[in-house]
Image (cartoon, rainbow, N blue to C red):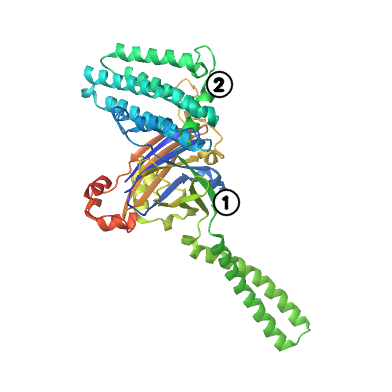
Amino acid sequence: MIKESVKAHGQYQLEIKQKVSFDRRAHEVRYRIETWFFLPAALQVNPDFYSPKYFQQSLKNYVRLRPPTRKLSQLLEPDEMLAELAAFLATKPDQQGLEPYENTLKRYALTYKRALRLAVKWMERNAQKRSADAITELLAEIHDVLAAYRALSPLAAAHEAVLASQAFGYCDEFISLVTLHYLRRLVLLDGIPQSAAIHALWQTEMAYCRRHFPESIPSPEGNNEDVLYRWSILRKYISRYLFLEVRRRKGHPLLLHSVYAISAAIAMIFATFVAFFWQGRYGALSNNLFLALVIAYIFKDRIKEIGRERLLSLFREWIPDRRLLIYRGEHLEVGSCHESFRFVRQEKLPPEIRALREQAHWLKLLNDRRAEDVLLYRKEVALHNQPELFERTQYSIVDITRFNVSGFLRQIDHLFEHLPVGDEDDAVIVGERLYHVYMIRRVFFAGQSASELVRLVLNAEGIKRLEMIQPLQFADHIARHPRRLRQAFGADYNQGDHAHQQQLA
């Protein structure tokens, strides 16, 4: 199953997030994503002014795991996470166990955040479920879970004295700040019952945070620069447990150099043939032979360059512009991603892409052919299911791509322009100059494809807004085609797992 979200991330960045779930028995999962950018010619984003290398530099790629899904009440059950955490902390401190110690605490903190977030989102989306009893039960669960975790502080202190770590306190600070955030979201809901009880728990947690983590409390009178910086560092420290390392490499260098070698060999064969032919006709030393060798050298150089271009176009499918190697830890490779960047001529567009682009026009006069440059970004991802990868996490990953659009704005010089028609009193009327960049995304997964259409509205200052015209949606008949599932997940897929088939649908 793939779920996707597209949103503006700040003034200049576009964030695309895919949540990919797969069967724990799958040997491998593969998916391919094509992103087509349709850019107004006025932006001059074309092969003459915008290189694929520049596009690469505008991309940031992240891959992370997802924490386990639990209810708050489940955290307190026997043989669940709090009990397991207590059993782990009750063991003898190990001087070599810093990473397992910190990872265990981080995993719990992230699981608690997810459990609380899901509980609050359930309240936000289901107004009919916001009963007084439900709110009281939720607040009691939050209180009990917080108290149970903090009661483990003496056990953690013994480990941290040996390991020279402060992970327990950092996780406690993270949990406290997350709790304050979601309690505030809860109390702001319209018509929420038990608002006084929610506010009381918020006040209690705020007092705890002020007492133990005063540097994380914002001041109404200051700029809170240090507070925000501390929260950013703390969040990254806790979330590092889920993030995989992405190492960047060039596209297949061996195949690329082989293509170059073939081109050079063809050019050399031509030059050698000319040399042998003219030498046999005019002798070893002659003006004619000299002239022939000069001409052969000129053509050899051109043949080599033209041959490179032609062969690269033929082998483009197998020579990506960049490879991303995905690692868990220092040595465990768990997947790879092949990326390609190129401009595409209008006449080379696939019919379904062209049809979807034509549907996006919101002005009738734009139905005529419009001058646009088309940029294609394609990536193919392969993930290997290894036990070391999904250590007590969900069998899913989050693929995050952030693209900086500032390169699209280099030719925009005016934020406002005068309108051609003014008032009777000759007052100047201006309008904001906007550029519409259409983005079509096509996802191929489990033998199916789905398309998504987004309008990105830009001005001289960056992203003004993002409009979802057609959301990504797969067909609902995938569960009736187990063969497609085996193609996506590998030979280890079990046809009898009907429940998982329904989930993928």
Is 475 placed left or right of 412 in the picture? left
Q: Amino acid at mark 1?
A: Asp
Is 100 placed left or right of 197 in the picture? right
Mark nearest the camera among 1 and 2 is 2
User: x and y percent of residue 40 in the render?
Assistant: 47, 44
User: x and y percent of residue 208 in the render?
Assistant: 43, 15
Assess whether mark 2 and mark 1 are in contact (beta carbons under 8 angstroms): no
Tag 1 secondary structure:
loop
Residue 48 is labelled as 1
Residue 491 is labelled as none
Tag 2 secondary structure:
helix
User: x and y percent of residue 493 in the render?
Assistant: 29, 55
Q: Nearer the viewer, residue 98 or 113?
A: 98
Q: Nearer the viewer, residue 218 or 353?
A: 218
N-terminal label among 1 and 2: 1
Q: Pointer 2: what residue?
A: 226
Is residue 365 visible to us here? no
Please rate how many residues cluster around mark 2, counting C-alpha atoms within 10 Å: few if below 14, some from 14 to 19, many from 20: few
Q: Amino acid at mark 2?
A: Asp
Is residue 297 visible to us here? yes
User: x and y percent of residue 288 in the render?
Assistant: 75, 82
Seen in the picture, residue 41 relative to 183 is either above or below; the reply is below
Q: Quadrant of residue 75?
A: top left
